[in-house]
Image (cartoon, rainbow, N blue to C red):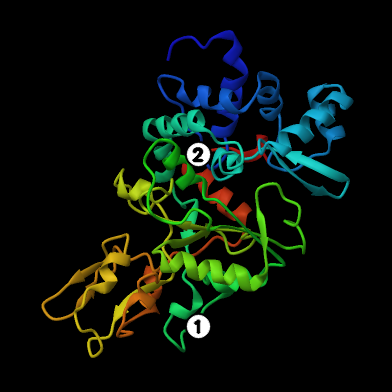
Amino acid sequence: MDRIPENLEAYYSLAKRLDALPNGYPATTDGIELRLLAHLFTPEEADLAASLHLTLETPEQIAEHTGQDIGVLKDRLRSMARKGLIAAGRTPNGLGFGLMPFVVGIYEAQIGRIDAELAQLFEDYYRRAFYQALTVQPPVHRVVPVNENVRLGMEVQPFESASQIVQRAQAWGVLDCICRVQKALIGQACSHPVDVCMALAPSPGVFDHHPVIRPLSMQEALETLTRAAQAGLVHTVSNSQEGTWYICNCCTCSCGVLRGMAEMGIANVVARSAFVNQVDADLCNACQTCQSYCQFEALQMGELIMTVAAIRCVGCGVCVPACPEEALSLVRRPMEEIVAVPQSENDWRQARAAARHLDLSEVL
């Protein structure tokens, strides 16, 4: 690209830092990724973010390696955390701050700030370059079905079930899906519900006074899952067994991940569940009701009954309750077809970094 204007140097440094994370932040030839960051960060904020690590550090620790005045630094870090530009959380030494990936992280935290300009900037960046990050394995997201859609008697691990993930949390919340809000702001709204993006936490009351997330009870969270499934939405979560603190309810028309499959033709853009759909030939009456619920074209009409293209089925189970004859159910895939889910977020990072030939020592 052409020489970066002086006032974008901080954004160039931040862009490089974000691309050094396992999630990725691919560069473009025209600098749209820099204009996107400039919409979100002041130059001073970008410069500070580029100096942070994924591991949370206290302001005192950050001041030590940046040389910034501790008073100014504390105010700026708190302000940036409120804007969703950096992570914040408790450390053994007090409140800490750290770098967040662009996706999943900074972008999703903009649901309370997104406007038409940001929506268009993201769309331009997504189509020019960000879709490339979706080709890297292991995927950012994995599919999880609701436990009730798995055939009775099948063993289901807690990390494999959306309902069990909800039940393991201690706080629950719902917010608008930034993907559908973004598409609506650029005039491409889909018909799926917006208020179904779910946040979870290990401590009670976390969302009680949150400016964007509306707190729910566990029962309301489970009802939100059901409402999303009835709308044909696919439950996806972070791609690790531990530390699952959100559930996205996704569609191929708006979701930034699933669009990679629908619009860009990227295979394995999301890690499928350990299950696959199965049709009971004795119950199926070939009504084809289920087909409209499958976003992956995995259901195909055979001569007499519905059939499942196992290679296209992601094991979401969204079509299962839609069948009026109860002819569909999820069964566990053969062991050789099941891809192991990373145990922790750090395991996922290590695998993803290896695939991208990254050295994580500077960013952790």
Q: Residue at x 83, y 21 (%)?
A: 67
Q: Nearer the viewer, residue 215 or 285?
A: 215
Quarter that holds the C terminus? top right
In the image, 221 versus 187, the foreground residue is: 187
Q: Which mark is residue 357?
A: 2
User: Mark 1: few, some, or many residues within 10 Å (few <14, many ≥20)?
Assistant: few
Quick one: label 2, few (<14), some, or many (20+) residues within 10 Å?
Answer: few
Q: Position of residue 196 (x, y in %)?
A: 53, 58
Q: Is residue 330 above or below residue 204?
A: below
Q: In the figure, is residue 70 to the left or right of 341?
A: right
16 horizontally vs 56: left or right: left
Q: Which SS class for mark 1?
A: loop
Badge 2 element: loop
| Residue 135, horizontal then vertical, whole percent | 39, 45
Identify which amino acid the numbered label 1 is placed on: Glu
Q: Is residue 189 above or below residue 15?
A: below
Which quadrant is the N terminus positioned in? top left
Which numbered disc, 1 or 2, marks the residue closer to the eye?
1
How far apart, in angstroms, are the residues tagged by discs 1 and 2?
36 Å
- Residue 5 picture quarter: top right
Vertical position of residue 39 compared to residue 332: above or below? above
Which amino acid type corresponds to the residue marked 2 in the rendered image?
A: His
Which residue corresponds to the image point at 44% horizontal and 80% vertical from the top-left? 150
Residue drawn at 30 percent across, 60 percent down: 296
Q: Is residue 173 left or right of residue 15?
A: right
Earlier in the chain: of badge 1 and badge 2, it is 1
The residue to which callout 1 is attached is 155
Residue sitting farthest toward the left: 303
- Give the total number of marks visible in the rendering: 2
Image point (33%, 84%), residue name? 326
Asked whether disc 1 touches disc 2, contact meaning CB atoms under 8 Å apart, the reply is no
